[in-house]
Amino acid sequence: MVTSLRGPDGGPSLSESFRGQGGSGNPPAAVAPQLHDVVVLSGCGHWTQQERPVEVNAALLDFLAHIDGTSPR
């Protein structure tokens, strides 16, 4: 069973927004307000960590460096 994460207004799914197919023109942060960053690795396939390890590690380290330990709940 596949489910989609919908925006707060029931709008386009997160994956539709990232692909630009939602039709709403909302940036990803509008659908996922706690989103840290969007990283696009052009020309990369499904094995991102094997194909572009330097860029993936840099993005992960940047994300981890910004975790403050508080929960948005």
Image (cartoon, rainbow, N blue to C red):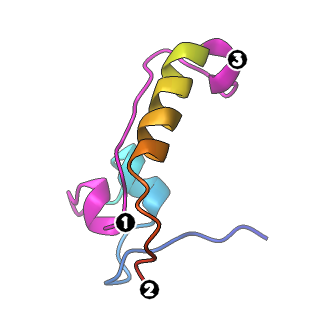
Magenta residue span: 24-51
Q: Secondary structure at mark 2?
A: loop
What residue is disc 3 on? 50
Which dot marks residue 32?
1
The count of marks equals: 3
Q: Secondary structure at mark 3?
A: helix
Query: Going by the picture, which residue comes out furthest to the right?
Result: 1
Q: Earlier in the sequence, mark 3 or mark 1?
A: 1
* Residue 7 falls in image quadrant: bottom left
Question: Within 10 Å of the Cα at label 1, are there few (<14), some (14-19), or many (20+) other Cα atoms?
Answer: some
In the image, residue 61 lies in the stretch drawn in magenta: no
Q: Amino acid at mark 1?
A: Ala
Measure the C-alpha gap from mark 3 to mark 1: 27 Å
In the image, residue 30 lies in the stretch drawn in magenta: yes
Q: Which quadrant would the C terminus be assigned to in this image?
A: bottom left
**Residue 15 x, y percent position in the rendering:** 48, 55
Q: Earlier in the sequence, mark 3 or mark 2?
A: 3
